[in-house]
Amino acid sequence: MRLDEAAVFKWVVIVGIAAALVIAVTLLTRPLVGALLGLAIVIAGCVYAYRWMGQKRH
Amino acid sequence: MESATVSVGHDHADHHHGPPEANQSSRIDRQTLGILLFIVSEVMLFGAFFASYFFLRVVVNPATWPPEPYELPVAVAGMNTAILVSSSFTIHYALESIRRGNRAGLKLGLVATWMLGATFLFIQINEYVHLAFSARDFSFGSIFYSLTGLHGAHVFVGLMLLTFATIRAFRGHFGPKAEDHLGVEVPGIYWHFVDIMWIIVYVTVYIL
């Protein structure tokens, strides 16, 4: 992945889809469930970013 | 012949004054690196505001959030979110256009992005006017206006950057080569960041 506008635009789409998922789950269940899902997505994103940086170093 | 060549090379070395040229990575140019470092600092700023928001929400711990009798216009803010997300697509279209040498597409994309951004800001100001609480009403009012106002200020800065980029586009600046349209690429990256932050603000403040 290169660091340019197109790469950042991909992140807009990814964050948008994740937010839509959280909104849908929150409206269908309870805010706490949506918040937990959001937290899980953020943690998964951090793990992905950490692994991606590790691959870049090697 | 050989001595003449050596002499020319020596003269060239003597005429070079000042420090050597700065080393630059071939993977990322200085302008893009600058805006990315700036965005990292901005993420920390927003992180501090989000930390305050969650701290107040947990510490105050009212029966409902927002506290009774206040309500947030979730539907209007949702429409506003759709408008801002659309503007990310139009700025991306503008950049893809100039990469292909399509100047009309660049202008169209920039003008559309500017208008969508201005509409977002107008609707947010209108929302502030019609809300039943002010920044002085409870900690909720303070953090709500702080968080959304901080983001609104970033939208305003982004609109200024887009204004300059649009004026330059109509004056015939920018070209298909990467180094010839950095004046659109850098505001584009900033605009995407503002968009991502609003999605997070909307989900956190209006939905959860």
Image (spheres, coloured by chain):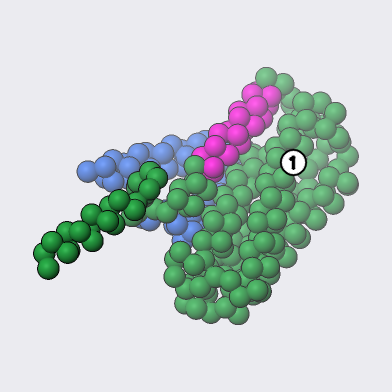
Chain colours: A blue, B green
Picture residue at 42% right of the left edge, 54% below the top:
B29
In-front residue for pair B97/B6: B6
Residue B87 in the magenta stretch? The answer is no
State which quadrant residue A32 falls in.
top right
Q: Main secondary structure of the magenta part?
A: helix
Task: Give the vertical position of B109 relative to B10 (above or below).
Answer: below
Chain letter of disc 1?
B
Q: How many numbered marks have been drawn onto this rendered protein structure?
A: 1
In-front residue for pair A26/B128: B128
Dot 1: within a 10 Å radius of its alpha carbon, few (fewer than 14), some, or many (20 or more) residues?
A: some
Q: Is residue B157 left or right of residue B91?
A: right
In-front residue for pair A29/B22: B22
Residue B45 seen from this side: yes
In-front residue for pair A58/B120: A58
Seen as rendered, the residue at the extreme left is: B2
Task: Give the vertical position of B106 relative to B152 (above or below).
Answer: below
Quadrant position of the N terminus of chain B in the picture: bottom left
Residue B45 in the magenta stretch? The answer is yes
> Element under label 1?
helix
Q: Is residue B1 left or right of residue B50?
A: left
Q: Is residue B109 left or right of residue A41?
A: right
Q: How far across and down, in percent of the image, does residue B73 sit? A: 78, 48
Q: How far across and down, in percent of the image, does residue B127 sit? A: 82, 49
Give the magenta part as a residue range: B38-58
State which quadrant residue B186 falls in.
bottom right
Q: Is residue B89 left or right of residue A54?
A: right
Q: How far across and down, in percent of the image, does residue B12 sit? A: 29, 57
Q: How far across and down, in percent of the image, does residue B113 sit? A: 66, 65
Residue that numbered label 1 is attached to: B149
> Mark 1 belongs to which amino acid?
Gly
Picture residue at 86% right of the left edge, 43% below the top:
B131
